[in-house]
Image: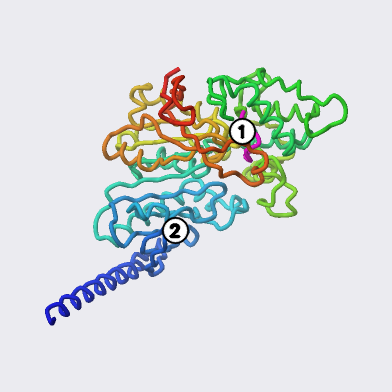
Amino acid sequence: MRVIFATVLLLLTTAVSAGHHEERSCHKLYQLTDLSYAVEPGKIIQATEFIPEHCKVRAVINRAIQVEVTMPTKNWNGRLMFSTVGGGAGSIGDITSLLSRGFAMASTDTGHEGQGLEFAAQPEPLIDYAYRGVHLATQLAKASIERYYQRDIEYSYLSGCSNGGRAAMLEATLFPNDYDGIIAGAPLFQFLEFIPWAIAGSRKQAQGPLTMASLKLLDENSRRACDAIDGVEDGVINDPRSCPIEKLELEDLKCKSKAKDDCLTEEQIETATYMYEGLIDADGAILSPGVMPGAESAGDWAMWMLPTGQLGGDGSLSLIDGMTPYLDILMRKVPGFSASKFDPVKDFYMLEEVSFLDVANASLKDFKDHGGKLLMYQGWNDFPLRAGRALEFFDQANELNGGPDQTEDFFRLFMVPGMVHCGAGPGAWLTDYVAPIVDWREKDVAPDRLIATQNSWKFGDAEETMPAKTGGFSRPICPFPKLAEYDGKGDKDKAESYRCKAP
């Protein structure tokens, strides 16, 4: 009995001692504080149903760049996953989803709080937002993790979408040694390209405003014209490039007399035409690509084109409306500049003034030489960050990095049919990008196809306007330029009935 009691007591004492050690080592992370870092004492966060016990530490770099780092107290797998934030940043991104898989995680607000764009009027916060914030936060995150575990990080990964995808691409191009693997979703490659397109679209929308009913009508029209091209009617246009605007026959949607919900006015057709075609100069060159047809009522068009409270004020502005005052802020140093007088075509290249925000080019040599792997994904039906821009980058990357055969060794683009901005839409878009990037970087197993499932999650008020079919079908997502093709005999709702085929 005494032996049993002593054994139990020893186990309890060991467990308590280990717990105290974890708490002490987490708490003492404040010792990383120096002239650059202001670090709070770390805290042990108790486990919940889905999130394991972990050490969490918060810090501030240069008085403004907030960083949070989380580290599982048990079974750390030697990896870091850093989450970059979309939109205007201004908040901490995901720092918990991969803790149960053994990752330490980190994120930053890039140096300002909130989604307002006023920070862009200050030079240093704007550069922090552009690229400095993520780079400096990465250094602190790595230092915190290695101090806590008392061993080196084995592999560092980063993931982000939209502006987070832009931040991911700038890490790959400007700081190629920061990360071993990067997941970049729907990157905002260039404000130079995005802002003129958005402002021109805002003006078109003011003249011929599309409504939720208009978007539903356009969605039904696109599916009627092009859904069946790939041999499978599933509410998804598999390759929207096969559905040029001529196939949409928008003039057939014109109201015969009084405007109604089941037709479009001439001005609304002009707005829709602009959205599909993009920003084109007087010589017919495409300055900024248009939105691919399909999924118009899935919520992405509505989120950007219809009035929203996201910009504050009285809620009368849409997100694309908000680009006009934002441009005034960005271009405030240019004498006499006025966004209200800005001509999106004639003045297009004026935005080179803020080129430091953009991904300069597709040369990834230093990232490749570091051993890095880059997995990019993009929805074919993304509204704000249109698919055409990702395809342009893909072509440039092949040209600048030794051709397709050499480039695919470290960079692959996955185009997702029926997906809108970063997620959602009528297609099969829900998949895991983490395991593939890990296997690619650590085992040299390149991702030849990703299996995605359809999911009913939708943007905003899109619930009533989405296509009815949300049956959870699955599809392979193929490395571009390959596309999923039905085998002609299997279950059309199962990914195994499709193969990835080159055009």
Of the residues shown, which amino acid type is indicated by label 1?
Ala
Which residue in the protein does label 1 denote? 295
Q: Quarter of the image containing the N terminus?
A: bottom left
Q: Is residue 293 visible?
A: yes
Pick whichever, 249 or 129, lies toward us.
Answer: 249
Q: Quarter of the image containing the C terminus?
A: top left
In percent of width and height, residue 315 lies at 73, 51
Question: Is 259 left or right of 438, judged from the image as shown?
Answer: right
State the residue at coordinates (65%, 45%). 326
Pick whichever, 84 or 449, lies toward us.
Answer: 449
- The CA span between labels 2 and 1 is 36 Å
Q: Secondary structure at mark 2?
A: strand
Predominant secondary structure, magenta span: loop
| Residue 474 included in the magenta stretch of the image | no
The stretch in magenta equals 294-300
In percent of width and height, residue 85 lies at 50, 49
Q: Is residue 327 visible?
A: no
State the residue at coordinates (51%, 40%). 356
In this view, the residue farthest toward the bottom is 2
Q: Secondary structure at mark 1?
A: loop
In percent of width and height, residue 58 lies at 43, 63
Pick whichever, 499 or 182, lies toward us.
Answer: 499
Mark 1 neighbour class, 10 Å CA radius: few under 14, some 14 to 19, many 20 or more: many
Q: Nearer the viewer, mark 2 or mark 1?
A: 1
Residue 67: mark in rendering: 2
